[in-house]
Image (tube, rainbow, N blue to C red):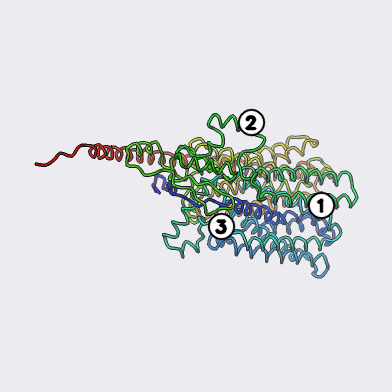
């Protein structure tokens, strides 16, 4: 491990990976954690499912739009203010957060159910409190799933976040389909279903969701000895080197794509064709089957334990002959004994290839993940030898560091980073983008009515809902695909993850401009652009915060959500809500809508100006982080050069000693 304080005060930390044999990771257990997290993210979408009962609530209590906005905004504010729970997660881990998630979701769902049963008389204050409690709970499910699961896949963050965040987006559509099929006339039963499912998932989280050994909580850091901490931290090496089987990821993504295609199509067909309830019931059953099909990701079949895909078998054979096939996943520094062992394991369909580092780094061992045999470790790849050729061969190897596998990270704590411009630049970019996106997504009917000069049709509202779901899911996938593509490149060729901030900031600027210049018939287009940016940003928040900050991951992640909270208050409640409400009251229509471009012009111009400043802060953060990455890579190069020079001196000394030992001993006397 090397620490260097550079000119601007940032600490460069290069961690040399542990040598020697390591216990392989049980991939079945690792993917079980991913499955559990993906299903838990359905619970994280219950806050969005509020839209499914908002119409029933508005009619039951005769609320106007301002009162409904107050209830939803209150839920968003408390649901996104998760920083205190971030401190708790970093100190105690996922178990207490899971307990809180069960309790708060249970209280929120039961209170809403009792309101619709007539047991509790609803009011704006009561319903706002109930919605706030429910949103806190569903956000805690997000916190447990994202922060825990991603630690098990440090080199596959993009694929993992794609699954987790897309399921969070699709969760509302999943429970919406179930509501249409089973709880059409009983809103209280619908909330009791949410209660049962969230409690079941919460119990599973408490029972099985644990952080990997190398991810130390604050409690563990204060109670474990230095030797114990070092021993557990050393296990991170295997998580970096051992590549998860691609086929299990591929299966999960096939199920995900089927859901992305099926759920919007089903929603559009039901809305436009006005099908009877028996069709809605059939669609709900298909939704259950597709969702449960995700469990196949952890099927104990050897065919899933490989990284090669059947569709690429022809390419794989050609690549193998060129030396670039699956065998390329074994580091070039591995010696012959390890290669033989790996080949034997591969023939028995048990090999999970380690991730190929960006260099031909030699390591003392090249462990392979063995399904069902977590205690098996490969032998040390280099055998002792007194021959100088042994050391000459090792001189071709480079020092293997953490940066070979993951991007450089700022080493400051959360409290220290609160005093840095980097964290606040990220916060401001999120604030400017997410606030405008909330306005567009949650006020689509009001915006389109103002720009069209008439109330939008129900079919158009349904179309926008479908486009929002699909666009958000595609945006999350795009961001995750970018991270996967960049992560697999050499350290010197990786694109800094902060460049991803330009997509959501740029998309919201384009969307606002298109809303102001396009004719009424083309207005769904800017809505789609905003939905893509919203999905992209949802994945960007967790990937950027987890990638560039090494310590206190939950605190950094949930601090970003304070920007979401403030964006909802400032943009939705004041910049748009008050401006629109005042002009709507002047027109005094019975439906409380405002017609004409002037109803939204002022608020959109303000949001456009804020979005431009968000683009500038994104550029500032990207330039700062890019320079930091170059400094880390330069320090790595210097360390490797120093290590290479030391090896040359050592080899010369050993060569001299070896030659001296071969000289004949002259007799005395």
Q: Nearer the viewer, mark 1 or mark 2?
A: 2
Distance CA(mark 1)–CA(mark 2): 38 Å
Tell me if residue 221 can be seen.
yes
Please provide percent x and percent y for residue 44: 68, 55
Q: Secondary structure at mark 1?
A: helix
In this rendering, position of residue 534 left or right of residue 666: right
Tell me if residue 10 can be seen.
no
Q: Is residue 194 above or below residue 451?
A: below
Q: Residue furthest left?
A: 669
Q: Tell me the residue at 56%/37% (across/down).
A: 326
Q: Nearer the viewer, residue 314 or 648?
A: 314
Q: Are marks 1 and 3 in contact (CB under 8 Å)?
A: no
Q: Which mark is residue 103?
A: none
Density class for disc 3 (Cα within 10 Å; few <14, some 14-19, many ≥20) is: many
Q: Is residue 432 above or below residue 200?
A: above
Q: Nearer the viewer, mark 3 or mark 2?
A: 2
Question: Mark 3 — residue?
Answer: 211
Density class for disc 2 (Cα within 10 Å; few <14, some 14-19, many ≥20) is: few
Question: Mark 1 — residue?
Answer: 285
In this rendering, position of residue 241 left or right of residue 470: left
Number of marks in the rendered image: 3
Q: Secondary structure at mark 3?
A: loop
Chain-order first, disc 3 or disc 2: 3
Question: Mark 2 — residue?
Answer: 314
Chain-order first, disc 1 or disc 3: 3
Distance CA(mark 3)–CA(mark 2): 39 Å
Please provide percent x and percent y for residue 640: 39, 40
Q: Residue furthest right?
A: 276
Q: Tell me the residue at 77%/39% (across/down).
A: 524
Q: Nearer the viewer, residue 635 or 83?
A: 635
Please provide percent x and percent y for residue 378: 48, 48
Q: Is residue 120 above or below residue 292?
A: below
């Amino acid at each position: 491990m090397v620490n260097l304080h550079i000119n601007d005060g940032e600490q460069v930390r290069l961690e040399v990976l542990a040598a020697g044999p390591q216990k392989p990771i049980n991939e079945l257990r690792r993917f079980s954690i991913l499955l559990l997290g993906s299903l838990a993210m359905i619970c994280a979408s219950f806050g969005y499912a509020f839209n499914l009962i908002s119409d029933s609530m508005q009619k039951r209590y005769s609320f106007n739009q301002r009162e409904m906005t107050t209830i939803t905004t209150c839920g968003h504010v408390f649901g996104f203010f998760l920083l205190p729970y971030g401190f708790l997660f970093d100190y105690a881990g996922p178990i207490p957060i899971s307990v809180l998630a069960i309790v708060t979701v249970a209280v929120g769902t039961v209170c809403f159910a009792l309101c619709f049963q007539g047991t509790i008389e609803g009011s704006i204050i009561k319903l706002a409190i109930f919605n706030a409690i429910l949103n806190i709970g569903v956000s805690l499910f997000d916190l447990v799933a994202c922060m825990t699961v991603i630690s098990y896949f440090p080199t596959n963050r993009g694929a993992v976040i794609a699954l987790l965040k897309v399921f969070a987006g699709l969760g509302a559509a999943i429970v919406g389909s179930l509501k249409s099929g089973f709880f059409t006339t009983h809103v209280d039963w619908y909330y009791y279903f949410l209660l049962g499912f969230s409690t079941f998932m919460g119990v599973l989280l408490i029972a099985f969701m644990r952080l990997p050994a190398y991810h130390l909580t604050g409690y563990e850091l204060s109670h474990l000895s230095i030797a114990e901490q070092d021993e557990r931290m050393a296990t991170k090496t295997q998580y970096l080197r051992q590549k998860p089987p691609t086929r299990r990821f591929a299966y999960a993504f096939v199920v995900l794509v089927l859901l992305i295609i099926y759920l919007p199509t089903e929603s559009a067909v039901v809305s436009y064709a006005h099908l009877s309830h028996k069709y809605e019931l059939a669609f709900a059953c298909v939704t259950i089957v597709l969702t449960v099909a995700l469990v196949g990701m952890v099927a104990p079949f050897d065919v899933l334990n490989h990284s090669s895909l059947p569709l690429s078998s022809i390419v794989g054979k050609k690549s193998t002959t060129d030396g670039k096939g699956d065998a390329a996943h074994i580091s070039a520094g591995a010696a012959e004994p390890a290669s033989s062992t790996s080949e034997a394991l591969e023939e028995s369909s048990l090999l999970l290839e380690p991730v190929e580092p960006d260099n031909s780094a030699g390591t003392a061992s090249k462990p392979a993940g063995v399904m069902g045999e977590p205690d098996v470790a490969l032998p040390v790849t280099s055998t002792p030898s007194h021959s100088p050729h042994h050391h000459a061969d090792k001189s071709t190897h480079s020092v293997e560091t953490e940066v070979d596998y993951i991007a450089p990270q700022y080493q400051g704590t959360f409290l220290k980073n609160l005093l840095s411009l980097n964290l606040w630049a990220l916060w401001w970019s999120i604030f400017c983008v997410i606030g405008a996106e909330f306005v567009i997504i949650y006020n689509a009917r009001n915006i389109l009515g103002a720009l069209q000069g008439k109330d939008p049709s129900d079919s158009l509202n349904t179309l926008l809902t479908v486009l929002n779901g699909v666009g958000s899911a595609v945006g999350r996938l795009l961001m995750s695909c970018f991270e996967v593509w960049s992560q697999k490149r050499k350290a010197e060729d990786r694109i800094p993850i902060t460049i991803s901030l330009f997509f959501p900031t740029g998309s919201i600027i384009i969307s606002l401009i298109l809303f102001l210049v396009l004719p009424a018939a083309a207005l769904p287009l800017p809505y789609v652009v905003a939905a893509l940016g919203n999905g992209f940003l949802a994945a960007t928040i967790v990937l950027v915060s987890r990638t560039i900050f090494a310590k206190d991951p939950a605190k950094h992640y949930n601090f970003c959500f304070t920007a979401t909270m403030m964006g909802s208050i400032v943009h939705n409640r004041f910049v748009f809500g008050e401006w629109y409400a005042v002009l709507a009251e002047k027109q005094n229509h019975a439906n409380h809508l405002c017609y004409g471009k002037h109803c939204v012009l002022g608020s959109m111009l303000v949001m456009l100006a804020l979005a431009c400043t968000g683009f500038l802060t994104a550029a500032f953060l990207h330039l700062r982080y890019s320079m930091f990455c170059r400094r880390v890579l330069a320090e790595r190069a210097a360390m490797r050069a120093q290590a290479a020079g030391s090896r040359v001196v050592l080899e010369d000394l050993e060569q001299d000693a070896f030659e001296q030992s071969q000289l004949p001993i002259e007799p005395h006397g």
